[in-house]
Each structure stands twice: as structure tokens, then as C-alpha cells.
Amino acid sequence: MSAPPTTFGRARLAVRTLRTDRWWLPPLVTFLALLAFVIYGVIRTFMNQWYWVPEYHYLAPFYSPCLSTACVPGSSHWGQPAPDLGPLVPPPIFVLPFVLGFRLTCYYYRKAYYRAFWASPPACAVAEPHRRYTGETRFPLIMQNVHRYFFYAALVVAAVLTYDTVIAFRGADGGFGVGLGTLLMVVNVVLLWAYTVSCHSCRHLVGGRIKHFSKHPVRYWLWTKVTSLNGRHMLLAWLSLVSVSVVDIYVMLVAAGAFPDPRLFN
């Protein structure tokens, strides 16, 4: 038998890729969508107004929980432990780092913005323009490993937004009431909880380090449910991002007096 042919590493191609489809479209759409959200988030954070509708107890997600003494009266459901530090440090600054930390270190979002913003790589079977690759072993990307800790902060934020939704079932006279804003907030918290618990960290938390699932039937049941949601983690990531934006914009417009909240009850 003859000796196997000698290999010389990867094939040397004169072109960046042999793909003939529109491989650049998904990263481009991701880039534009995430960029739009970032721009809106920055503007909304420093706008520092139109985030509370006292008549129906609507609190915009970007300002929840509102923990600063700069918060408008009635919007601080959990006290005001943070001081008023002026217009350069609006109330969302005290909470957004934890929310953004969870999103930025999310396994799906890593893939999304690595491809869309850093082209590392821009798509499958497409060469990246970088000469070196160190992965997530150096600063700042090594900080991605704190995702599991941001997960616990995300649980707290989701619980706070759930409370905001519960008190939004209040009418103008103090009784029970439901408006379009209430329904939008319900959809938002459902999507946020689905996105949060579908996280890989949650999957490991409920089912990790178990050698015999038969001895832990409750944790196994939870693991199967989280695993099912985990398969839709990308979809839930985008839907929850859109729902947060929609609710925030809606509350802003109602608070600014652009239009009244359509009421179904009271």
C-alpha cells in the first residue's frame, strides 16, 4: 500500500469565500437592528422624561426599577436609595448595566454581534479579516464568563417588571382596569421570562452536575422544559428585545400625551 498523500494545511483560495448566496444579508440585518436598539436606548436613557403614567400605573421598562431621587413621584416602587447625580447620570444608569450585562454576555448575542460588528467571522465558510484569533481568553472578552452571574440579576429585573405589570391592572378610579398598555406589558414579561429561563446558564443550573436523572425527577422535568425553550433562545432573544422597545415607546407616547391609552375595562 502506498503512503497517504502529504497535506499542507488549509486550501489556499484566491477569493474570500466560494459561497454564492447572500451570506452578507443576515449579519447586515443584525448590525442594523442592534445599532438601532443601541441608538434608541442611549437617547431614551438620557431623555429622562415621559416614563411614568400615574393614571394607569404604567412604568416604562427602561426606567424600571426607578431607584433615584430624581425619579418622578409615584414611579419608585422600591424606594430611592440612589442619589440624584444630575442629567449625566439619569435613573436608568443604576439598573441598565445589569440588564445589558446579561444581554451582551448571552451566548446567542455573542454570535450575533461577533459576526455583525467584528466580522469574526461574518458568516459560515467566509474568511474573517482578522490575522489573529484569541477567542475569549483575553480582556475584555474574557469577561464574557460572568454571564452566569448576570443571569441572577436578570431574574431580579424580570421579577420587578412582573410587579410593574401586576400594578398596571389598575383603573383610573383605583379599581381593576385593563388597557392596551396593560396587554403589551403582559406580553413583554412573558417574553422576558421565556428568554431569561431559556438561557444556557439556567439550563445548567437546573440540570447540571446530575449523574442520574432518575434520582432527580423534578430537576429532570425542569431540565427538559428549559432545554425545549433553549432551542428557541435566538427567537426569544429577538422577540423580547422588540417587546421591551415597543412597551417603552408606548409608555413614552402615552406619558407625553401623544394619544390616550385605549381602555378595555375602566
Image (tube, rainbow, N blue to C red):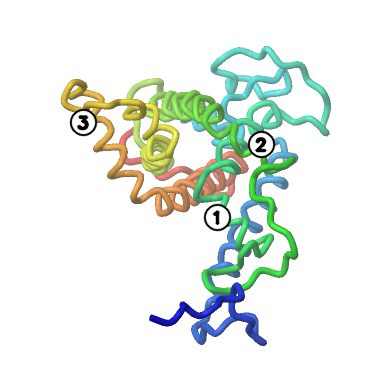
Tell me which numbered mark, 2 or 3, is placed earlier along the sequence: 2
Q: Which mark is residue 221?
A: 3
Q: In the visual, does 90 lie left or right of 12?
A: right
| Mark 1 vs mark 3, CA separation in Å | 29 Å
Q: In the visual, does 228 lie left or right of 153?
A: left
Q: Nearer the viewer, residue 8 or 152?
A: 8
| Residue type highlighted by circle 2 | Met
In percent of the image, x 66 and y 24: which residue is there?
Answer: 72
| Tag 1 secondary structure | helix
Indicate the quadrant containing the C terminus: top left, top right, bottom left or bottom right.
top left
Q: Looking at the picture, does residue 38 appear above or below residue 219?
A: below
Q: In the visual, does 41 lie left or right of 218?
A: right
| Mark 2 vs mark 3, CA separation in Å | 32 Å
In percent of the image, x 58 and y 20: which residue is there?
Answer: 74
Q: Quadrant of residue 142?
A: top right
Q: Residues within 10 Å of mark 3 (few under 14, many from 20)?
A: some
Q: Residues within 10 Å of mark 2 (few under 14, many from 20)?
A: few
Q: Which residue is mark 2?
A: 143
| Residue type highlighted by circle 3 | Trp
Tell me which numbered mark, 1 or 3, is placed earlier along the sequence: 1
Q: Looking at the picture, does residue 32 appear above or below residue 79?
A: below
Q: Which mark is residue 32?
A: none
Indicate the quadrant containing the N terminus: top left, top right, bottom left or bottom right.
bottom left
| Tag 2 secondary structure | helix
Tell me which numbered mark, 1 or 2, is placed earlier along the sequence: 1
In percent of the image, x 55 and y 69: which residue is there?
Answer: 123
Q: Quadrant of residue 2?
A: bottom left
Q: Nearer the viewer, residue 198 or 42?
A: 198
Residue 114: x percent and y percent? 62, 57
Q: Nearer the viewer, residue 23 or 243?
A: 23
